[in-house]
Image (tube, grey):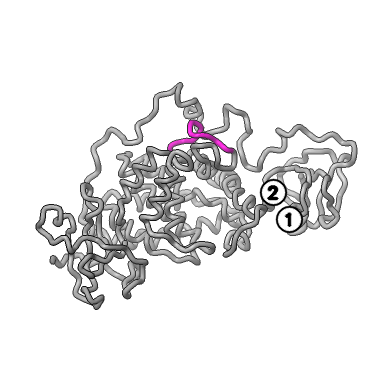
């Protein structure tokens, strides 16, 4: 539309259209224009034939009246009614938005997933980084909420604020990733979207560190993670926060967040790298072609989109959402492992599982001897034998903090009674990663 309907251009002449109250729309009519910009509605196509009562109900929920084609007027070719915000659906443009990455993999050299750089070494003891990491995450939560509010209201995104947020995360992860990974276990269901965006940013950077990416790549990957879900700010809260099962129509609206996110970053994210738009659009695509919004395949997806797809799923599964309870990290990794090669890039999925380990920092564990503690850090060579802060004795009573290095059980220097028996949900036995403050000076066992 033009004039009062914003900058969208009219696809049909006024003489070709009839104004019809939304409540009077009938199945078989072709809706060509709305009484408001398409961006303010959940419809994925700018022009569609009404085929169900649910579409009519959705029109009634969002519009007072619509414009339908007069009988006998020829509809424009289907290619003009492309999904909102998606790039033109030409085969050569179906995948990543980066021109030099659009070629089929067989015609270009495959970039190694694990970079040919030395592995990162911790630049700071994990205990000394905890205070910094907590401050970084607290500031990051404030910043991402501000960024999402801008996305929701159609304002220009503060890209400098986004870059600063990611930069702070990169610095603490380079110093020691274990500290900030502990902080990602601190979650609030009422702030899910904001915390999810920040957690995906952190987890993606930590994963990139494991893959030995350089600092510039880590910064860009973190930015992609931070902004990947901005399109959800255009989803009606009643659908986004619905506690029950979504209807097919509601799920279609949810899927539209990838298209909305791409458009939002394109219009309001001044100076953003093209990969941030690529990831916003493609992070729900799958290597087997079963994803959305365009059903792309493995060779059409950028590496960063494939990475964020894995990290996005992992954080969602391990978080309390309005429609599902959180699952343990081990269960989330099992789901990713089982779906490797289909939903997730196989090689990246296996590397991610290796990077996270079976007991990520902040995991509440019970040992064979009955003592309970919180995992402080993993061990590169012994991922199943982390460093644990013991906080409850065998009777589950409070005790002075003690640090135990479980990898000592491998050499026999520590009894195997200190091996991990099981994990527990955060908050069990009165222990919570949100409330516990790691001491800078360890107390050895």
Q: Position of residue 143 (x, y in %)?
A: 45, 58
Which quadrant: the N terminus? top right
Residue holding disc 2: 43
| Residue at image location 44% in from the left, 48% down from the top | 225
Residue 300 sits inside the magenta stretch: yes
| Residue at image location 15% in from the left, 53% down from the top | 410
Q: How many marks do you count on the picture? A: 2
**Vertical relation: 62 (above or below) 293:** below
Depth check: 258 or 273 in front?
A: 258
Which quadrant: the C terminus? bottom left
Q: Position of residue 361 (x, y in %)?
A: 30, 58
Q: Position of residue 293 (x, y in %)?
A: 59, 42
Secondary structure at numbered mark 1: helix
| Residue at image location 59% in from the left, 56% down from the top | 152
Residue 350 sits inside the magenta stretch: no
Whether residue 421 sits left or right of residue 251 in the image: it is left
Magenta residues span 295-303
């Amino acid at each position: 539309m033009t004039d009062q309907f914003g900058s969208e251009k009219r696809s049909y002449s006024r003489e070709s259209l009839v104004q019809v109250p939304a409540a009077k729309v009938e199945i078989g009519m072709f809706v060509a224009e709305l009484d408001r910009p398409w961006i303010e509605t959940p419809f994925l196509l700018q022009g569609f034939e009404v085929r169900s009562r649910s579409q009519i109900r959705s029109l009634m929920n969002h519009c007072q009246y619509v414009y339908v084609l007069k009988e006998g007027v020829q509809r424009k070719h289907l290619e003009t009614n492309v999904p909102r915000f998606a790039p033109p659906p030409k085969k050569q443009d179906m995948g990543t938005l980066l021109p030099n990455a659009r070629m089929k993999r067989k015609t270009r050299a495959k970039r190694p997933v694990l970079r040919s750089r030395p592995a990162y070494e911790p630049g700071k003891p994990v205990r000394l980084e905890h205070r910094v990491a907590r401050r970084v995450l607290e500031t990051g939560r404030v910043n991402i909420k501000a960024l999402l509010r801008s996305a929701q209201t159609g304002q220009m995104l503060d890209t400098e604020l986004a870059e600063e947020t990611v930069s702070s995360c990169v610095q603490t992860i380079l110093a020691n990733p274990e500290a900030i990974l502990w902080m990602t276990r601190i979650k609030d269901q009422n702030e899910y979207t904001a915390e999810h965006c920040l957690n995906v940013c952190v987890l993606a950077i930590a994963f990139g560190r494991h893959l030995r990416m350089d600092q510039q790549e880590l910064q860009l990957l973190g930015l992609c993670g931070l902004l990947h879900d901005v399109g959800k700010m255009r989803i009606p809260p009643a659908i986004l926060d619905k506690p029950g099962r979504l209807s097919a129509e509601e799920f279609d609206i949810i899927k539209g967040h990838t298209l909305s996110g791409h458009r939002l970053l394109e219009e309001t994210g001044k100076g953003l790298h093209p990969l941030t738009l690529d990831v916003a659009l493609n992070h729900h695509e799958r290597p087997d072609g079963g994803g959305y919004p365009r059903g792309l395949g493995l060779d059409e997806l950028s590496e960063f989109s494939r990475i964020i797809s894995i990290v996005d799923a992992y954080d969602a599964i391990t978080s309390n959402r309005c429609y599902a309870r959180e699952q343990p990290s081990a269960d989330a990794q099992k789901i990713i492992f089982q779906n490797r090669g289909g939903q997730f890039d196989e090689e990246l999925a296996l590397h991610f599982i290796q990077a996270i380990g079976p007991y990520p920092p902040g995991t509440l564990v019970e040992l064979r001897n009955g003592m309970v503690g919180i995992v402080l850090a993993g061990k590169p060579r012994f991922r199943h034998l982390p460093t644990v802060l013991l906080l409850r004795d065998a009777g589950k009573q409070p005790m002075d903090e003690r640090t135990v290095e479980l990898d000592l059980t491998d050499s026999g220097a520590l009894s195997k009674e200190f091996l991990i028996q099981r994990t527990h949900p955060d908050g069990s036995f009165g222990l919570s990663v949100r409330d516990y403050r790691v001491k800078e000076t360890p107390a050895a066992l």
